[in-house]
Amino acid sequence: MRRVFPSPEALRPRAPFSRWDLVVIPGVLVLLALFTLALQGATEPFGPTSPNLTVSLDPAHLPYYGLRTLLRMLAALLLSLVFTFVYATVAAKVPRTERVLIPILDFLQSLPILGFLTATTSIFLGLFRGNLFGLEAASIFAIFTSQVWNMTFSFYASLRTVPKELQEAAAMLRLSPWQRFWKLEVPFALPHLVWNAMMSVSGGWFFVVASEAINVVGRDQTQYLPGVGSYIALAIQQANTHAMLYAGVTLFLLVLLYDQLFFRPIVAWAEKFKFEQSESSDTAQSWVLTLLKRARLSQRIARLPQPLWEWLWLKSARRNRPGEALEPPPQQRGRARLADLAFNLGVALGSLGLLGVLLGYLFGPGLGFQGGRTLQPNPNLNLELSPEIAQRFAAVGIRPGADETVWLSQVCSATQGGKQLSSRLKALLREPGVRAPADLADSCRRPLAPAGKVSWPEVPEVLKYGLFTALRVSFFVLLVTLVWLPVGVYIGLRPRLTQWAQPLAQFGAAFPANLLFPLFVVTIAHFRLNPEIWVSPLMVLGGQWYILFNVIAGTVAIPNDLKEAARMYRLRGWGLWRRLLLPAIFPAFVTGGITATGGSWNASIVAEVVRWGNTTLVATGLGAYIARWSTGEFNPHVGLGMLVMGLLVLAYNRLIWRRLYQLAEERYRLD
């Protein structure tokens, strides 16, 4: 009988320090120093007397701007991860809350980032009074709203499709909810979650431009936080082509940097959590992960919190407590029906109360009526929110709002119903930037809505705008699905190609469509094309990547044993797609489709109004309506646009995507 002994090298004691630590430890210290530098710039004083924030188009500042932007995106990613674990877990595990939380998630993911900015900027400035971190927090929150929905939907879908044999194994091992979450559910969801986190970060670049150039009430100029997004915004405003090229190169280098140092190691590490019985010979590799595994001192330092983790693990164990049944006993079904009835009643009453508060905010005290008559629209006469025109109105005794708005009702009150007009006011009302009615006296005789409020005749018009945007979103999401579905499957089936395609796809997703706006604007203006049609593709330039990333993630997660079975049965062509590929990637595709649709709706606010220098193209739609009424602070018109957009997306998802989700849960899960 042959005996095998360990080699002398294996028996030799290992030193606690390796040469690879000479690379890892200084690298970590450099990252901490860069983090400190970026954090110092984010906590400078900022108050009413502080000068306006701006950026320089000198390319020498781009490394620092990139550092500040990466810090905001990292903070937003961490917030998104915490929100995902809490929100998606509650929605997936508590059936009654699912009926409320998932529609709310559908509604929130469709709301434009500019709406979140206008609603939260004053709140964060009030919380961090006298400190620049108020604007930083508003920007981080806006980036968070562009990242979190995709990750939450992905984790929710994974929790709903955990294989039953794994659930039974967890029940037999009597795992507590805490242990089950970290030992079963998070590892099972991790491959999909990592790819969706990559997509969220890359897709967040599309909205960085809007989140770093912030309108603050009380200031005439836009506040440009130091960052790549504000650099691009200023370059677009000044029509500086060279600055746009510098920004594109910087963006490519930043994406390559965080792909190599952050995402590729996580993708390679998450390979071990794939649900399969046989491992593929081709797996994702990362030089950074290999470096970290060989750095022995760094690993010992990283394992220092392990006793705390073990203590939490033991404290969360069931011990003598009984385990949970996978299905409730029959005697509890009657109680469950009564609890469902009470829950539904509470939701209905809460919804009615919220609806009443919302209508009061939008339409005013009379909810849009006065003396049995419907109030008419009260337009803002300072169409472009020009400070110069606002000052001229103030000079004739009509005080503009803090956001430079001048309402028709104010003019009617100051001119005795439009009958007593001074020569200066007459000349002002004929200015190109003033939207005054042709017959001022006739308009003043009508009952007008309160200043800043919405009237009921505006609601059908906003719904019409929403239908225009819905048609654009539906057509182009279907188009990009037909393009990226086969491409994503082709890439996902080839691990080596996936490693090469991953940074390229991240750069394509991270590349802000705003950098392409000048090309579209110049082309449309030169050839005199119809903006209603040719501006529409800009809506899906960011959303299309959600479909590609989710399809790749779904294909990569296909168990290797299923691939081997398909080869044994010689499945090819349409048979392979019908029996293996489409069913396997279907849950991931549905997640990508939902987030791509929501992202396209979200992008409509910047895609339906595009600018390059002095040229502006406007397409009819809900995004253009919200952009027109975005005055620097949240107002009822922006609220109406966001409400209509959210309700349309909610109906869209309930009628289409939710049914596909149910199909994925019932038929296309790995059981």
Image (cartoon, rainbow, N blue to C red):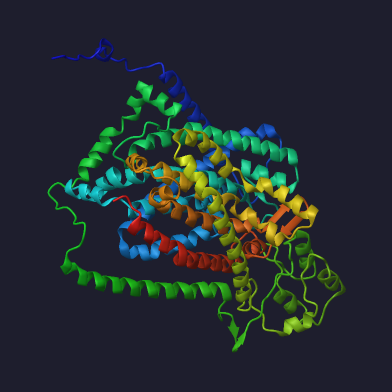
Which residue is at the far top? 8
Q: How many marks?
A: 0
Give the residue at x 35% y 54%: 668
Q: Nearer the viewer, residue 5 or 96?
A: 5
Q: Is residue 612 left or right of residue 75?
A: right
Return the x and y of residue 86 as percentages of the image width and height: 36, 52
User: For the point 69% across and 49% down, which residue is it?
Assistant: 517
Task: Tell me: residue 516, above or below residue 470.
Answer: above
* Residue 380 coordinates in the image, percent (x, y): 70, 70
Between 222 and 296, the one lying in front of the other is 296
Vertical relation: 368 (above or below) 397:
below
Q: Position of residue 278 (x, y in %)?
A: 30, 36
Inspect this view and state whether residue 85 appears: yes
Identify which residue, 121 or 472, lies in the foreground: 472
What residue is at 65 percent from the left and 61 percent from the top? Answer: 627
Quarter of image, res 633: bottom right
Q: Is residue 56 visible?
A: no
Between 643 and 566, the residue placed more toward the observer is 566
Report the residue that reaches farthest toward the bottom: 372
**Residue 603 quadrant:** bottom right
Q: Name the residue at 63% across, 68% down.
A: 465
Quadrant where the N terminus sits is: top left
Q: State left or right for residue 430 relative to residue 662.
A: right
Q: Residue furthest right?
A: 423
Q: Position of residue 440 (x, y in %)?
A: 78, 79
Question: In this rendering, is residue 503 above or below 572?
Answer: above
